[in-house]
Image: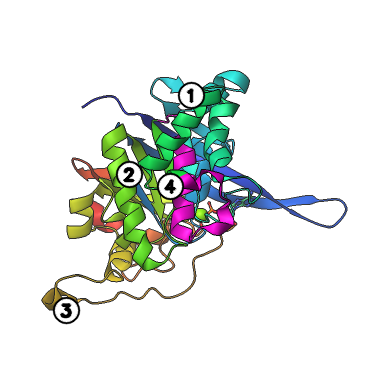
């Protein structure tokens, strides 16, 4: 196996929680990301899935150093990003891009499509004049947009087309690694598949590596090679796509999966939904022991005790943190 493109070691992001209007007193921490370990191979898509608030976006931002981690290390090939600052970090960042959920908020409404797509070329001084214009036309073609859109403004486009502009802009500086933070969640269902297909085609043609963030397992099923399931700042299960969908081991993964419709009508008729009771606990006061024990249908006394279950491999490429699996 080739060395990973991205390596994340014990990544933590804890936000201080402050109270009081004038003298802001720190009253605790939100452990948004609490000790993640994973790698992403070159050319691979890793799906990162979990309910809203479990720390997915913070993980993405911490990998790119848009949010400095509290602890842990992030490597891009052999370079430790967490040790870089200033110009060396800026140079590495050029090779990584993030695409956000909302294509309406990510584009400056006062800029034309051409200047939006060309902005990274100017920022990183990659091209100017005719060379820059040609590159912008090439990028528009790559994402399936007409060259005559060059002089139009974002408000003239639909959500799907805007997300194509966002993607063209992300590709401008020729990145190796792209984080999609729920990139299709805000789009009409009919448009979602088109954008997924576009991302897959671009991946094959340009040899891109993806971290694809989604809040449910149905979306990443079509795009991810491996899937990491996150709950309250921790990865509870990580496996290749086939193992995860056919043999989910963590009760949380099982419950997420039970919510995904099955295309086969006979299997779909037999699908049992596992409805979790209670709300996601506050990341300020995560449960002791296993972080999932307050909602787990199979909770045992050991699950309430410290330390929680260890995240470990049960078969090659399939890791899980659950006491049920250890027995
Ligand atoms: N800048 C911040 N300051 C304080 N808390 C934050 C900040 N960003 C995120 N959080 C908190 O961290 C947790 C994880 O957030 P986030 O990473 O956005 O989750 P997700 O993307 O999975 O919905 C949430 O409880 C959120 O309120
Ligand atoms: Mg998010």
Residue under label 1 = 131
Where does residue 274 sit, x and y in percent of width and height? Answer: 30, 74
- What separation in Å lies between label 2 and label 4 (alpha carbons)? 10 Å
Segment tinted magenta in the rendering: 148-175
Question: What label sits on residue 180 in the rendered view?
Answer: 4
Q: Is residue 181 above or below residue 171?
A: below
Q: Is residue 44 visible?
A: no
Is label 4 within 8 A of ligand 2 (CB to nearest ligand atom)?
no
Q: Is residue 72 visible?
A: yes
Q: Is residue 264 magenta?
A: no
Residue drawn at x 17%, y 59% is 246
- What separation in Å lies between label 3 and label 4 (alpha carbons)? 33 Å
Question: What label sits on residue 88 in the rendered view?
Answer: none
Farthest-out residue, right: 22
Mark nearest the camera among 2 and 3 is 2
Is 167 situated left or right of 244 in this image?
Answer: right
Residue under label 3 = 270
Give the mark, 2 or 3, whose residue is nearer the N terminus: 2
């Amino acid at each position: 196996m080739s060395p990973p493109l991205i390596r994340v070691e014990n990544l933590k992001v804890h936000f201080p929680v402050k109270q009081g209007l004038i003298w802001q007193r720190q009253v605790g921490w939100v452990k948004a990301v609490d000790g993640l370990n994973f790698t992403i191979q070159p050319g691979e898509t890793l799906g990162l899935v979990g309910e809203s608030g479990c720390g997915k976006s913070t993980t993405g931002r911490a990998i790119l150093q848009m949010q400095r981690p509290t602890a842990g290390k992030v490597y891009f090939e052999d370079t430790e990003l967490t040790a870089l600052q200033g110009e060396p970090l800026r140079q590495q960042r050029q090779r990584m891009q993030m695409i956000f959920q909302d294509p309406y908020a990510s584009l400056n409404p006062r800029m034309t499509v051409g200047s939006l797509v060309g902005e990274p070329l100017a920022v990183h001084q990659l091209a100017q004049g005719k060379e820059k214009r040609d590159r912008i036309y090439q990028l528009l073609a790559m994402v399936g947009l007409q060259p005559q859109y060059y002089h139009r403004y974002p408000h003239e486009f639909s959500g799907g087309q805007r997300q194509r502009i966002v993607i063209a802009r992300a590709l401008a500086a020729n990145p190796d690694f792209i984080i999609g933070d729920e990139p299709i969640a805000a789009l009409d269902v009919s448009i979602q598949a088109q954008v997924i297909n576009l991302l897959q085609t671009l991946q094959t043609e340009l040899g891109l590596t993806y971290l694809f963030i989604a809040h449910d397992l149905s979306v990443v099923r079509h795009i991810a090679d491996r899937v990491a399931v996150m709950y309250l700042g921790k990865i509870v299960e990580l496996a290749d796509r086939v193992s995860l969908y056919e043999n989910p081991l963590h009760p949380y993964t099982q419950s997420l999966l039970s919510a995904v419709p099955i295309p086969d009508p006979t299997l779909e008729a037999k699908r049992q939904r596992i409805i979790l009771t209670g709300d996601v606990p506050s990341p300020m006061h995560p449960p002791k022991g296993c972080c999932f024990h307050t909602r787990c249908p199979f909770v045992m006394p050991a699950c309430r005790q410290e330390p929680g279950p260890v995240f470990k491999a049960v078969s090659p490429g399939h890791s899980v943190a659950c006491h049920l699996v250890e027995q």
